[in-house]
């Protein structure tokens, strides 16, 4: 009788343990699916974003950075630490950057192994001999490394997304936004974002007023490389032209870009279709 009771207890315990393991497994799968949603990496982006850039193929982006003019554009707009990050994770599925008046934030939806490599190897080596200082805000841990000119580079990890920036305010805004679980991207920017080709190495969406055009509209671009040259295809919402004739859009766009980046040599062609003007640009060395 005792032997039977012992076997019964073992059987019940085994079933209970197996049930707990199965439930835990499906919960983990559910969390992984939730964190891998295409929009999950965009959820932390604060609503005052001016430019959004998705690096779909980090290895190709690193190759594109060998193009002198292309690299100069990004060196003007982004701190060097972000190039180091992209170079270090050539197999990451997606790296997103958001540009704000306060600075730039990098978001990465990567495996625990990749994130661990950044946290435990890349950043400590980059900022040695300093160690990261931990701060807790709104239930999340933030880590900050001292850098030159009195700056601090910080990061946090939440729900499978790693986010890093030199702006602690932007990081806190990103974390708070992520915890809401809702996108706060401007509607016009989000529409263009979803229309871009995720198979291209780089996608960019930015406010038209970055080029002195309308405050209301947005421009988009798919960037890729061929024969050592940089090409981009994109769309301009007609509202962004602010009265500029459609036939002149290519010339105006070329002038505005080269006015901001005078070292670029661009050829721009446009084609009007509905409420958008499609354009193709070629950037020679």
Image (cartoon, rainbow, N blue to C red):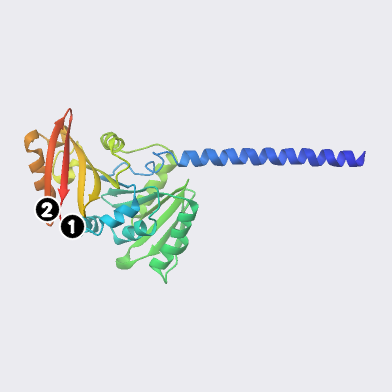
Percent from the top left, x then y, of residue 163? 40, 51
The image quadrant of residue 45 is top left
Q: Which residue is mark 1?
A: 69
Q: Quadrant of the C terminus?
A: bottom left
- Considering depth in this image, is 106 or 232 the residue closer to the camera? 232
Question: Residue placed at 41% from the left, 55% from the top?
Answer: 155
How many dots with numbers? 2
Task: State the mark number for residue 121.
Answer: none
Say which residue label 2 marks. Answer: 265
Taking 4 as reference, is 99 left or right? left
N-terminal of the pair, mark 2 or mark 1, is: 1
Measured in 3D between alpha carbons, the distance from the residue under mark 2 to the one under mark 1, in whole angstroms, is: 9 Å
The answer to whether the residues at label 2 and label 1 have Cβ atoms under 8 Å apart is yes
Q: Is residue 12 toward the left or the right of residue 19 in the image?
A: right
**SS under mark 1:** helix
- Left or right of 178 in this view: 272: left
């Amino acid at each position: 009788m005792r032997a039977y009771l012992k076997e019964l207890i073992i059987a019940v315990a085994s079933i209970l343990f197996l049930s707990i393991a199965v439930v835990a497994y499906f919960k983990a799968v559910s969390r992984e699916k939730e964190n891998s949603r295409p929009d999950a990496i965009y959820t932390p982006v604060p609503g005052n974003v001016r430019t959004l850039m998705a690096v779909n193929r980090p290895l190709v982006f690193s190759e594109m950075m060998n193009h002198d003019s292309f690299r100069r554009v990004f060196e003007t707009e982004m701190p060097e630490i972000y190039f180091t990050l992209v170079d270090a994770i050539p197999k990451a599925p997606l790296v997103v950057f958001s540009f704000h008046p306060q600075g730039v934030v990098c978001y990465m939806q990567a495996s625990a192994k990749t994130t661990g490599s950044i946290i435990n190897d890349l950043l400590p080596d980059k900022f040695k001999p300093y160690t990261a200082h931990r701060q807790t805000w709104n239930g999340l841990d933030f880590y900050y490394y001292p850098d030159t000119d009195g700056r601090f580079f910080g990061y946090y990890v939440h729900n499978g997304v790693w986010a890093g920036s030199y702006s602690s305010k932007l990081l806190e805004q990103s974390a708070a936004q992520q915890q809401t679980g809702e996108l706060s991207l401007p509607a016009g920017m989000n529409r263009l974002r979803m229309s871009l080709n995720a198979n291209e190495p780089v996608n960019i969406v930015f406010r038209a007023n970055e080029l002195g055009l309308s405050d209301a509209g947005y421009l988009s671009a798919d960037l890729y490389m061929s024969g050592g040259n940089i090409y981009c295809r994109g769309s301009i919402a007609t509202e962004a032209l602010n009265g500029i004739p459609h036939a002149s859009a290519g010339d105006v766009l070329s002038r505005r870009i080269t006015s901001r980046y005078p070292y670029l040599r661009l050829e721009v062609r446009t084609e009007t279709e509905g409420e958008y003007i499609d354009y193709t640009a070629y950037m020679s060395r």
